[in-house]
Amino acid sequence: MSKRNLCQISPGFEEIMPAEYRDLVERGPYGKGWGVAEMGSFKELIEEHPLCAGCGLALSMRLILVSLPSPEDTVVVGSTGCSALAFPQVALHNIHSLFGNQNAVASGLKRALALRFPGRVKDVVVIAGDGATCDIGLDSVLHSWFRGEKITTIMLDNEAYANTGGQESGMTQRGTVLNMAPKGKKFGKVAVPEIARESGCVYVAVTSPAKPKNMEKAVRRAVLLARDLGPTYVQLLCPCPTNYKFKPNETLDRIRDQEKQGHFRPREYYTPEAEAFIRQLEEAKG
Amino acid sequence: MSTEKYQVLSGPEGYLPPAAALMGIVLPARGEALVEGSPVARAEAMEKAAEKLLSAQNPYFFPGPLILWDWKEGVAEKARAVGEMARAAGAGIIPMPDYRPKYPMINPAVEINPNHPNLTIWHNKIDVCVFVGVHCHYANVALKIIRGGTGCYTIALCAEAGHEDAMITFRDMGLAELKQMTEVLIRKKGELQQ
């Protein structure tokens, strides 16, 4: 089966296909290797979504989807949270798992895809919120890392349970007051990147949509390294205007301010094997 | 529960209708089909399906991803055969390109979604529909929703084991069987015009 055939409309049905699908076939990113630099020149995998204006998570999802090295061979596993509201609009195979189960589902999926498509690389990417990754799903996340599952885990960190009214999560910063956390959070952000590093992830990156090229690099590295070496983890700061009560056009400024104040610290960790692999990739790319 | 044999008839049967399987309807054996829950020979079911399609006011075909996307050898030929069948039946075609629950973004004028197929049927006032090329698990869901919430008569052309929740269901529908169905439609249409 060639890649071309995966998104080719059968003869006779071209005219009756909705415009959205014709656009995806004619101007979509499948098999093209396009990225952030080409944004605006092709039909993206998500264009309409029901998330709030200025949602950092929506912007991150858009950039993640643009950054996937092989969208036509990627399956995304999501979980309960704001992102789950947008997934039905994503033109990519995606599975909604029970809250917190996402890494367990992704582990099984990765193994099943390897059996079903032995001659083909299938990327499995978990995209879930901070509640699903750091709190409710932490056990399945950690055990997928302990087992060395070759999957990528991406946390959309909006520092709250946002679509249930604003409860604190493990990723909320110390002292933060939210609608449903009126006394302020008593402890700081859980150090998930460091836990990931110590739990078997070969590559860990903390970044944000405020630096799209950096974010693209992190997502691509994470997906490519997970193919061969083992689990990878990317944590994206995605501020939430609705719960943190700032204007929708201030989302990126908020990330920059957090970085300036030292509350947000972009960083990368990789194993020596991962570092060598990245060097090889980047040398090959020139 | 009634001891009378359950019939799979067009609805609306109400919110959450029982699955036909739960009511004792068993999938057809090889060479057979089900008409309203009763097993009959495939040829007989083709006659019945043709009658339903040709007497319908607004029949539509709902091709699914297995037919709409040219994803492997043999699909293009089946897609052409389905197109010819729809033309022979005088039916329109509304595609089901994928199964994303795109609520509330679906445009019922141009697409059907298995998670809320009733929207497309209501919007277009479809009285007879044909499922073809829809993965079985989603066909089962959609056919049950249609029976529950609409009066549409459903026909399933399944390449696998059939769908007991359709009013008429065929199984093992390969290229030859699709062409056979088209021939029945053309003959029946000729008979009706005489």
Image: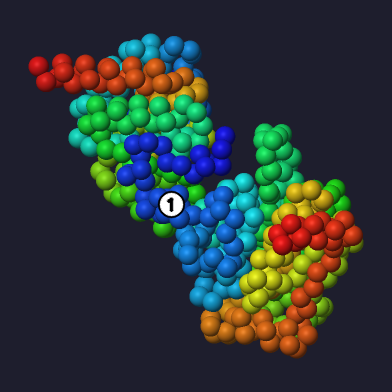
Q: Where in the figure is residue A215, as x and y percent of width and height?
A: 68, 69
Rendering quarter of residue B144? top left
Q: Amino acid at mark 1?
A: Glu
Q: Please state the total of marks drawn on the protein image.
A: 1
* Badge 1: chain ID: A
Question: Could you say which is closer to the camera, residue B4 or residue A204?
Answer: A204
Q: Secondary structure at mark 1?
A: helix
* Residue at image location 23% in from the left, 37% down from the top: B58
Q: Is residue A284 left or right of residue B12?
A: right
| A113 versus A61 height, above or below | above
Crowding at label 1, few (<14), some or many (≥20) Cα neighbours within 10 Å?
few
Of residues B59 and A174, the one nearer the viewer is B59
Q: Name the image colouring.
A: rainbow
Residue at screen point 56% across, 73% down: A55
Q: Residue furthest front?
A: A286
Horizontally, residue A187 falls left or right of residue B176, namely right
Q: Residue at x 69, y 43 (%)?
A: A121
The answer to which image quadrant residue B186 occupies is top left
Expressed as whole percent of the image width and height from the top left, the position of residue A240 reads 61, 76
Instruction: Tell me the residue that label 1 is attached to.
Output: A26
In the figure, B84 relative to B29: above or below?
below
- For the point 50% across and 60% down, the residue is A44
Residue A88 visible (yes or no):
no
Front in this rendered view, residue B83 or B150: B83
Quarter of the image for the C terminus of chain B: give it.
Answer: top left
Task: Determine if residue B76 is in view.
Answer: yes
In percent of width and height, residue A223 lies at 71, 55
Q: Quadrant of residue A83?
A: bottom right
Q: Position of residue A115 (x, y in %)?
A: 71, 34
